[in-house]
Image: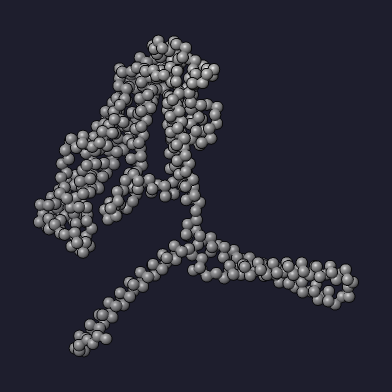
Amino acid sequence: ANKDGASSKVLNLPIVERLENGLTPGEDALRSYNLSLESGVPRDWRKDREKVEVVLIRHRLAVCATGIAGCILACAQDQLIMDNVALDHWAMDFLKAMCFISTCITLALLYRMYILQELFERIKSHLGNLTPLDPDVELSTPLYSKRFWGEFMIIAIICPPGVGGSFGILNWNNYILYRTESVLAIYSTLRFYLVWRCVRDAFLQALPKRHTVAAFSHIDLGSAVAFKVILNGPWATGFVGVVWGFNIILMSYWWRVAEVSMCLQEPHMHNDPECNERHAKIWNLGQEGEEFEKVNDTFMFNAMWVIWCTSSTVGYGDLTPTTHSGRVVAGITAFVGVCSAALLTAAFSSVLTWSSEEISAMLILQRESARRSLQNLAASYLIKWYRRSREHRRHKTLDLEAGAKALARGASRVAMHHTGHAKAEFQKVKRESQVDLADLMSDEVRVEQIAARTTFFVAATEILVNKATRMRQGLEALLHTPTFSP
């Protein structure tokens, strides 16, 4: 685009002059691209922001798919261990090989994704700040990114084919043996952070002209904005529920691995002589005289029950952690559960809060209901008033004894009370039925209507002024007389 003289002239305009001409910081650069197209020069896709963004999002989806596939394969290795499948079984080697291939593909796609991310940032800087655009990103660029190396460490650490083993640690004075495949399977579940990147892109893609708005507002449309959009939208309750449920499943898997000792599995699952010692089977949690026989519980639903009770801050107590790592998992679960409960409460309160439109609608419905019941209340009031008046006249005409007169006065006061209550109810409903429609609108709706009417009034005034100016110029040209300004 810079090879064209017209486009270079547009790009070199000062920022104030571009704004006075109605150009945004990005529109002038886009105009230069259009000029290059009109001149017959083919556009490089690496200079097109939309195309680069589409390719970048596709790479993020591919990284997420291959990364989660490797995580599932790693968890399948751990499931074979829980089922006491021999460590040299062909299924174990097959899963390790497929996990290794999936991880290599994920790392290659991740490297390519960071190159596209650098190219996308350069295009944003070129359109926003008019910096020179160099689409040739060096292949070594991701190596200088700390974030890339962080993701590399999360994804790359796996148990490759032909490699395995176990390691034992002391849990208080008790001995517990873990398989390397099981521990790395837990580590591989950290790859689920890749899902959030895809969810973020899905919600941000629905925002129109997001890049232009972000450039003028000087904000970064990233994870923070996407998280706020989700929690302030109609899908907030479902999102929090899904995240909470996923955390329960994930923490249940961590719990099971943390609480299972290989010493208590089948004999062919370990060759550690320490497993034959007493403290590998009879445990004591640091309390004198409270020894118990350690038993592995590999049933996933029992782990989910413990995590659910912990996450909901109930703490049923029938199953408790017996290892340090199990207590760490329980602590993480409790923290995430409290945060999820708070977010779910906020989401429910947002859903149950009346909007300005709903408040106006309910007030209008209340007025219509008052109008419907007004006639019945008027009839009831008139009937009670007539009965009270008739009884009062009848008592005056009759010659009653002292006791009968007292009863009559009491009945008259009761009738008067009922009549007064009916009158008050009638007047209340009458006031509600006579409320003007404008008074039933909320403050936000009123402000919007006033703003719309003001805008219309300003536009109509400008039209009238323009018409008056043209009429004035026409009269001046017709009469050939100078204009006298007041």
Where residue 146 appears, x then y in whole percent? 25, 36
Identify the residue shown where x is 51% and y is 60%. 359
Instruction: Choose between 177 and 352: the one closer to the eye.
Output: 177
Is residue 239 placed above or below 101 in the rendered structure?
below
Identify the residue shown where x is 31% and y is 25%. 158
Give the left or right position of residue 62, taking residue 425 as reference: left
Give the left or right position of residue 157, taking residue 140 as reference: right
Coloration of the structure image: one colour
Instruction: Choose between 336 and 45: the one closer to the eye.
Output: 336
Give the left or right position of residue 210, taking residue 362 as reference: left
Is residue 154 placed above or below 271 in the rendered structure?
below
| Whether residue 418 can be seen here | yes
Write down the quadrant of residue 95 in the picture.
top left
Q: Count how many numbered circles sit on residues in the image.
A: 0
Is residue 103 placed above or below 402 in the rendered structure?
above
| Whether residue 261 can be seen here | no
Where residue 135 appears, x then y in whole percent? 16, 44
